[in-house]
Amino acid sequence: MATLKVPAHVPAPSEDAEQLRKAFEGWGTNEQLIIDVLAHRNAAQRNLIRISYGEAYGEDLLKSLDKELSSDFERAVLLFTLDPAERDAYLANEATKRFTSSNWVLMEIACTRSSYELFNVRKAYHARYKKSLEEDVAHHTTGDYRKLLVPLVSAFRYEGEEVNMTLAKSEAKILRDKISNKHYNDEEVIRILTTRSKAQLNATLNHYNTAFGNAINKDLKADPNDEFLKLLRAAIKCLTVPEKYFEKLLRQAIVKLGTDESALTRVVTTRAEVDMVRIKEEYQRRNSVTLEKAIAGDTSGDYERMLLALIGCGDV
Amino acid sequence: MAPFLLIALLLVYLFTLNSFKAKKMGHPAEVEVLSKALSGIGVDEKSLVSILTKSHHEHKRSIRRGCSQFFFEDERQFERWNDDAIKTLKGEFKRFKDAVVLSLMHPWERDARLLKKALKKGPQQYGVIVEIACTRSSEQLLGARKAYHSLFERSIEEDLAAHIKGSERKLLVALVSAYRYEGPKVKEDTAKSEAKALLNAIKNADKRRLIEDEEVIRILTTRSKPHLKEVYEQYKKISGKSITEDFEAELFLKETIECLCTPHTYFTKVFDTALRVDANEDAKKALTRLITTQEAGNFKGVSAKFAHKIEERVKGAYKDVLLGVLARGEMNGQV
């Protein structure tokens, strides 16, 4: 469930656009006003505001924001303002440009979005970058990472709840065999993880646990330094229990020396309208402190206020 | 009185003689018409109606005796239908019905069903998977994937991945999963370097099979069609040969490239194979598939090229559909 708080009575997009323009004018910027508007509108409303702003002032709202804001606050506002599909396309493209850790962002987007959401990302990617997501991912990855990530971003998984238990049993056994022999990048492992529906995968992994005594991720911890294994474990988590994946990401982002603002911003802005309620619950359960407190303790200023607004703190 | 009687008798004699002759002479001609109506692609319904409504018992017996391709002498002295001939006929009569059903079907459902059928039939039909994945637009392919969910409660990629065991699995799964960019923008530098990469793969083909080469798969399964056409051109410049020539040994790769870069060549080939005298059932089925699934504009020039063969080999209502679709193609030109 979403934590985004939208007022009962939402002003017309043109009014919101006017408010934002006012926030940019004069000396300095009225960041609180920006938060009051943008952090309290849903995706459809934000899209209308963008259109209205563009028509009224002849400039893309995002461009104005880029000019006026800076640093982590800017990134949080920009990312959140974007339409979800566009946002994911932006993040994915960014991920193909840098190195190593960016594989995580690709995996995260591919595994935690629904089949239709993922396809909307691919459409948005065409429109924005004049290329296909899979061609960029394929071009910028090699070896096992390419083998895993290209099928992940290309998947259009069946979304029904139907489960074939016989298949679950046989595929659990296949996974067990490959993992026991340390064939982590085996085609069959990749096949099962990148093509089966989430419901089917869940059934398979549950059976794995029942039949073999360990959850699959435990068996995949054999080599703690293997980056590929880490990615594989994370993918499995994303596909089956995303809120736990996001909780861990948040925990690591906040607890690290300093804060990994990149991950923190990404999780909050991409999940505020999806499942942030569950993530907050998971966070409190695991860390015995609310996410609000943790964020407040580790960030400051407008950036902090933006994040807190998005996770549902304070008034509408 | 007598001369009139004589003339009357003469007339009666001539009449019976004629009708007797007619029975005898008509039969070889009708046997020929029947044979023609029932051999080829589709059946000549009009001729068959004509024969059936005019023939009577004796007539039909002589036809049976004259048509050794359809009937044989049973040991208990009766002319018996050849079971294989009936089977063949079933297929030929079915051809028009299949054309009707496929033609009216929503393109998404059509492609989903064709993909499922091809997968079920096995490796000799995997070319159909290549054809569909490579000749549809990105939106059409997405539509087929959606319909597949509805029809079979699985994703196309999971079924392909689970059932294809050979080295072509990676290629085929990647082909149906693609959502290629469709804009005209092409980077010449990238096309050049990828042409070089393909040439490299060819050179090392004895050490590493082309269909298992990562770069070959990446380029063919992710790049846009305009980009691949540029790669095709660049390849010709640097190697002097066409990619399809060099990839001759790997059938699925060759067809992939053909369908993506030179679809017209591919379609012409399918028509040619289907219209050969020794064409097998799969080849003939391809005809129905093409004329009901492809945009008519993709067949420009085909009717002229194959006019004679179509006239010879294709019959009846099925022929009318074929010619009609091809004619529409000539009229519309490019889609």
Image (spheres, rainbow, N blue to C red):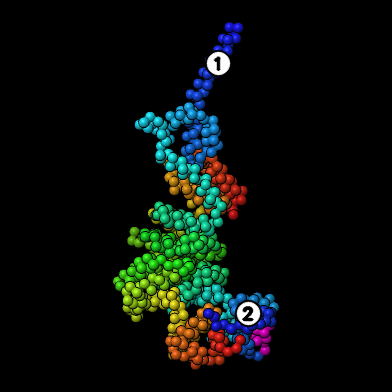
Residue A276 on image: x %, y %: 51, 82
> Residue visible at 64% across and 82% down?
A8
Picture disc at residue B12: 1
Q: Chain of mark 2?
A: A
Label 1 neighbour load within 10 Å: few <14, some 14-19, many 20+: few
Q: Position of residue B231 (x, y in %)?
A: 48, 61
Res B207 → quadrant: bottom left
Amino acid found under the numbered disc labelled 1: Val
- Looking at the rendered image, the quarter that the C terminus of chain A falls into is bottom right
Q: Residue at x 47, y 73 (%)?
A: A110
Residue at which label 2 appears: A61
Q: Which residues are magenta?
A: A18-26
Location of residue A222 with respect to B192 vertically, above or below:
below
Q: Which image quarter: residue B319?
A: top right
Residue A23 counted in the magenta span: yes
Q: Looking at the rendering, which quadrant does residue A273 occupy?
A: bottom right
